[in-house]
Image: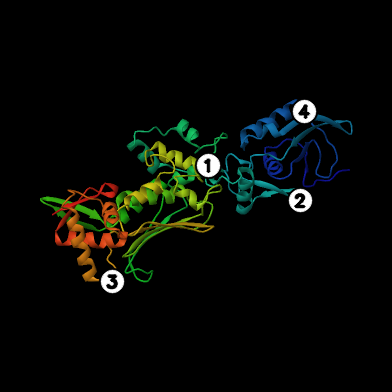
Amino acid sequence: MEREQANLEFKRQYIEDIKYTVVAFANSEGGRLLVGVEDDGSVCGVSDPDETMLRIMNTVRDSIRPDITLFTRCETIEMDGRCVVELTVQRGTSRPYYLSGKGIRPEGVYVRQGAASVPASETAILNMISETSGACYEEAVSLKQDLTFKKAEAYFRQKKVAFGEAQKRSLGLINSDGIYTNLALLLSDQCVHSVKLAVFDGSAKTVFRDRMEATGSLFEQIHQSFEFISRHNRLHSSFDGLERIDERDYPIEAIRESLLNAFIHRKYDIGGATLVSMFDDRLEFVTLGGLAPGIQQDDLGLGVSVLRNRNLANVFYRLHLIEAYGTGLMKIHECYAEASVKPKIEISSNAFKITLPNLHFRQPSANLPDAEETECLTERILALFQNKEALSRKEIESMLDISQTSAINALRALLDQGRIIRRGTGKNTRYVRG
């Protein structure tokens, strides 16, 4: 006589609670449920096997998510001369399976433990999600299913882009089983990730001047983070004749691209916050997760982009937050085309860091070229304008055979004296006599 075990359970008659056993079998190694057998293994049989099979299959179809019916078989067998209903359940491929009324949490997800069906731990649930979803975090089933999208809906509405049930499915927020994915979690008001921002005095992480943590939907985090950085991105003004020219410490386009890069390329299955740190001389963005597989640091300068979160990037693209894949870092470098110091990228196996230099930071005087040398160079530069109406910095470097640093320091001195005027920005910057 058989006894109940991990892959075998008896029921004297049909009861709705068989759904717990079916879920547990599907999440474990599969099993057989025999209806018409006493707990001690003696056969009592069922009086109406067709009705019993119908009720069992209705329960399996209506009470369990994702759909497990393809992994079940229900039939009648004869045991000791009596009719018994046998339900065979295979191990499912879309684990974790859960009771539709309970959701993906311990009280809704069951596994087999010996001859009993018991609630799964959160760790066990996460492991099942990881096993069945592979390495793609954003496509995996979200452990949280009670999600709202107030901020996301407002942002889609502002951009005049539809955000209904059909769009959520096509964008990857809802999978084929009608379940929210981790992408939905990222865009929801319940997003568990955050960005920590801080402004420090000086060039070290010693004294805080200001700080905040951006939370909620990624759309809200982007907005909060950009507003915080903008408040501390100081404005500097100069004049070209009657025209006032305003410049920030950090180019707005470089900030925008660095921030979006931090959101798109972050490895979200690593715990911890994205870090944004502003110092007197630089602005740092530290993102969790190194380079995505298939790309090396040397590839970045070529505009090569391997997306870790492809569906998230597609959402940002649809909303015109990004224009094209792989252009962000190139745009950042273009913003510093005329600067003496350049953005720096540092990569480890678990982190990605972009550092933007402060365009108006002045090194201590001891680090500047000799005053007499600079004055001599400024006169040589002024002499060039006798034959040229406008010159770029690179043209000046080439014509005088001087370094980039020397050219920038001399041009800065001439600008401060009002002897030359700067026109244009970025790679289109030109200098004319004042």
Residue nearest the observer in this picture, 119 or 40: 119
Separation of residues labelled 4 and 3 (CA atoms): 90 Å
Separation of residues labelled 4 and 2 (CA atoms): 28 Å
Mark found first going from the N terminus, 1 or 2:
2
Which quarter of the rendering shows the N terminus? top right
Residue most toward the left?
242
Residue on which disc 2 sits: 114
Q: Residues within 10 Å of mark 2 (few under 14, many from 20)?
A: few
Tell me the amino acid under the disc marked 2: Gly
Residue on which disc 3 sits: 364
At a point 49% along the width and 51% down the height, the residue shown is: 298
Mark 4–mark 2 contact, CB under 8 Å? Answer: no
Tell me: 396 left or right of 102: left
Mark found first going from the N terminus, 4 or 3:
4
Residue on which disc 4 sits: 49
Question: What is the quadrant of residue 141 in the picture?
Answer: top right
Residue nearest the observer in this picture, 254 or 391: 391
Q: Residues within 10 Å of mark 4 (few under 14, many from 20)?
A: some
Tell me the amino acid under the disc marked 1: Thr
Separation of residues labelled 4 and 1 (CA atoms): 39 Å
Image location (x, y in percent) of residue 107: 61, 48
Mark found first going from the N terminus, 3 or 1:
1
Mark found first going from the N terminus, 3 or 2:
2
Callout 1: helix, strand or loop?
Answer: loop
Separation of residues labelled 3 and 1 (CA atoms): 52 Å
Image location (x, y in percent) of residue 75: 78, 29
Give the number of the mark in front: 4 or 2.
Answer: 2
Q: Residue 181 has which mark?
A: 1
